[in-house]
Amino acid sequence: VLGEAGPPNQVVKVQPAVAFQKEVQVVSRSATPAVPPTVPVVPQRGLGAPAAVQPLRMAEHWASSYTPSPVGRTSVITYPSGALVNFQELAPALAPVAAANAPHRARIVPAIESGDLMRQTLQTYTACDRDLN
């Protein structure tokens, strides 16, 4: 868990706090490593892969398997790391951005809903981050 001090290789299990989804509380500590989930949430070094390559592979896997939701009916999105984006909470702050982008809505919504925007964003990121940092 980022920001938590403890001995190296200590496994800390966490669960979302009831009052606020972005905070976590320690549930239990274990000296033995836990069985990794099917799709790792925390980047780990793969066999033969440099440490910097693994997060990129995870992002590529997530982008390729991501199923976009309809823009008009999606109020919340949760990423593999557990990060939660609540668009209803952000709507007032993003209203000026939405207004500025309104002329492009007919083009942008299909790109989001088809997954093309997700794939293009990852492709652009990969092209710009050639040294994987």
Image (cartoon, helix red, strand yellow):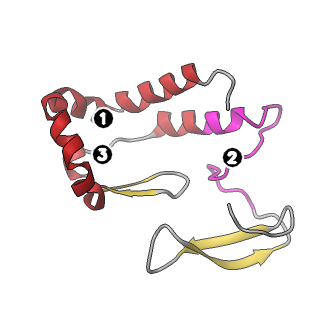
Give amino acid for label 2: Pro
Image position of 103 (left or right of 27):
left
Whichever of callouts 3 and 2 sits on the residue coming sooner in the sequence is: 2
Disc 1 or 3, which lies upstream in sequence? 3
Identify the main secondary structure in magenta. loop
Residue where numbered disc 1 is placed: 112
Looking at the rendered structure, the kind of residue marked 3 is Ser
Alpha-carbon distance for marks 1 and 3?
Answer: 9 Å
Q: Is residue 5 above or below residue 70?
A: below
The range drawn in magenta is 35-58
Q: 80 left or right of 116? A: right
The residue at which mark 3 appears reads as 69
- Asked whether 53 falls inside the magenta stretch, the response is yes
Where residue 28 appears, as percent x and y from the top left, is 71, 79
Q: Which comes sooner in the sequence, label 2 or label 1? A: 2
Q: Give residue 66's quadrant in the image.
A: top left
The residue drawn where x is 48% and y is 23% is 124
**Left or right: residue 9 compared with residue 100:** right
Observer-nearest of 4 and 29: 4
SS type, badge 2? loop
**Residue 87 at x, y = what percent?**
29, 55
Residue underneath mark 2:
43
Q: Report, in whole angstroms, how far the alpha carbon at label 2 lies from the one at label 1.
A: 26 Å
Position of residue 49 in the picture relative to residue 112 (left or right): right
Label 1's element? helix
Residue at (28, 36) in percent of width and height: 113
Rendered location of residue 9, percent (x, y): 85, 62
- Quadrant showing the N terminus: bottom right
